[in-house]
Amino acid sequence: MEKVLELSHLKKYYGQTHAVEDVSFHVNAGEVVVIIGPSGAGKSTVLRCINRMIDPTDGNILFEGQDMARVKKEKELKAIRRRIGMIFQSFNLVYRLSVFQNVLHGRLGYMSTFHAVAGRYTEEDKRKALDILKMIGLEEMIYKKAGELSGGQKQRVGIARALMQDPALLLCDEPIASLDPSSSKVIMDQIKQMAKTRNIACIVNLHQVDVALAYADRIVGIHRGTIVFDDVPSKLTGAMIETIYDAPLEQLTVGIEEGIAANA
Ligand SMILES: Nc1ncnc2c1ncn2[C@@H]1O[C@H](COP(=O)(O)OP(=O)(O)OP(=O)(O)O)[C@@H](O)[C@H]1O
């Protein structure tokens, strides 16, 4: 399998706080890797280091053969980031703009500053946006303002925007944290389907262990900035969940019972 991303000894320190201590793992094309861990374990920090929203303290971030950690020029970063889509808990849409315009924003990284500012998208980009919106079941919403959609619909627009980038890697930071269970299922189904049909490597940060078990090809468990588990879902035991969350199972409320039942 083709390795899309490889992290080696990634570290991120904020003064005395070691947010990420020594993280190494990889993601293959078409694979869904779910990162779980308690609040403050370092999950978001890992994702934000990968696309250099924040600068790592040390380590390597090999993406499509290039070390993201060593790229200094903004122009080079912009070129690499085109191939990394990001999906956020808070959607990060422009609510006063239409669904269609929000989706087209996925092409901004490919345009000159002049064309981007003027909103000059090519006919091909517009066709592509329409195709993706159809695929994701939102074609009837294209002229609606993004702010008028439900949470689940907003996140589908977020997915469509990421797909417009033709990403090799998709980073999803708590994509279902603000959604109800049925919308969560739709979003997780679409992320998984995208990974498989378009051969995109996906990293998904999640709080819900049951969802991780249902959707992950591999689960990475982080505890205090360090990886304590990296394996297929069937290997995640109750004892390991206690280690990751540093608490007895009965005190945990992160979809543990459902998760254990699914793995029993
Ligand atoms: N900008 C920052 N300055 C200082 N400390 C930070 C900063 N961002 C994160 N941290 C610290 O780094 C650690 C890891 O935070 P991070 O947000 O990555 O955790 P997380 O696992 O994503 O948590 P959650 O599930 O609650 O989002 C925490 O101790 C946090 O307080």
Image: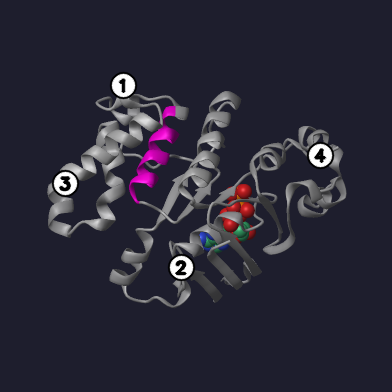
Numbered range of the magenta stretch: 153-165
Dot 4 beta carbon under 8 Å from ligand 1? no
Residue beneath the point at 64% across and 69% down:
24
Contact (Cβ within 8 Å) of mark 2 with mark 1: no
Q: Quadrant of the N terminus?
A: bottom right
Residue matched to label 3: 122
Q: Secondary structure at mark 2?
A: loop
Gap in angstroms between the C-alphas marked 3 and 2: 27 Å
Residue matched to label 4: 263
Q: Is residue 144 left or right of residue 177?
A: left
Q: Is residue 232 left or right of residue 95?
A: right
Q: Secondary structure at mark 4?
A: helix
Residue matched to label 2: 64
- Tag 4: residue type? Asn
Q: Is residue 157 magenta?
A: yes
From the top left corner, tell me how far across and down residue 245 is, in percent.
77, 50
Q: Is residue 222 left or right of residue 201?
A: right
Q: Earlier in the sequence, mark 3 or mark 4?
A: 3
Residue 140: mark: 1
Residue beneath the point at 46% across and 68% down:
64
Q: Quadrant of ligand 1?
A: bottom right
Magenta region, mostly helix, strand or loop?
A: helix
**Is residue 78 visible in this depiction of the protein?**
yes
**Is residue 95 visible in this depiction of the protein?**
no
Q: Residues within 10 Å of mark 3 (few under 14, many from 20)?
A: few
